[in-house]
Image: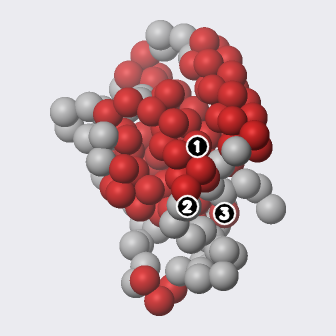
Amino acid sequence: MKRTTTIAVLVAATLAASLTACGDSSDDKAAPSTPPTATTTAPKPAQSATASAGKPVNGIPPKPTGAEREAYLAAIKAVAPNAAADPDKAIDAGRNQCSALNGGAQNVDHSAAQRFGNDAHPLTDGQGKAINVALRATMCPAS
C-alpha cells in the first residue's frame, strides 16, 4: 500500500509540474481534423494476446488490479477527470496506449489525447503528454 501511495504522489507531482509547463499555446488547441493513422494507434488485441503472467505481450500490459488499478485511475483523473469516468474504458485505453509507447509509435502525445478524449471532452496534446507520463509511472514503465 505504501508503494502505491508513493507512486500516486509521485505521479500527481509530475503531472502538476508538466501541466504547469503547458502554456496556453495555439499548438495544443489546434488538433488536426484527420484521425490518427495506423502508425499512431494500436489495434485492440483479442484477450488471448494479452499477458496472463503479468508480462506485456505486444507491448500491452495485463489489466491492473487492486492498488495498482486505483493508482492508475487516480493518475488519469489528475490529468483529465472525464477520461476516467468509465474505469474499464480508461484501462483499455491505457493498455492500448502502452502498446503505442512501447512500440515506438509517432506522435504519442496526440495519440493519447485522441484515445482518452472524446467529442464532448477533447484533450490537448499537452494533456496527452501528461497521460503518457502517468502511464509510464503506473501501468507501462519504460523497459
The residue that mark 3 highlights is 102
Label 2 residue SS: loop
Residue 133 in percent (x, y) is at: 64, 39
Is residue 119 rendered to the left or right of residue 48? left
Q: Amino acid at mark 1?
A: Ala
For image coordinates 54% across by 61% down, the residue present is 65
Q: Quadrant of residue 5?
A: top right
Q: Quadrant of the C terminus?
A: bottom right
The residue that mark 1 highlights is 71
For image coordinates 36% across by 39% down, the residue present is 83
Q: Quadrant of the N terminus?
A: top right
Label 1 residue SS: helix
Residue 102 in percent (x, y) is at: 66, 63
Task: Indicate which disc, 3 or 2, sits on the residue closer to the N terminus.
Answer: 2
The residue that mark 2 highlights is 64
**Dot 1 alpha-carbon crowd within 10 angstroms: few under 14, some 14 to 19, many 20 or more:** many
For the view shown, which residue lies furthest in the bottom direction?
A: 48
Q: CA distance from mark 3 to mark 2?
A: 17 Å
**Dot 3 alpha-carbon crowd within 10 angstroms: few under 14, some 14 to 19, many 20 or more:** some
> In this view of the protein, can residue 38 be seen by the observer?
yes
Front: mark 3 or 2:
2
For image coordinates 59% across by 50% down, the residue present is 67
Is residue 17 rendered to the left or right of residue 19? right
**Dot 2 alpha-carbon crowd within 10 angstroms: few under 14, some 14 to 19, many 20 or more:** some
Is residue 74 rendered to the left or right of residue 56? left
> In this view of the protein, can residue 97 be seen by the observer?
no
Task: Indicate which disc, 1 or 3, sits on the residue closer to the N terminus.
Answer: 1
Q: Amino acid at mark 2?
A: Pro
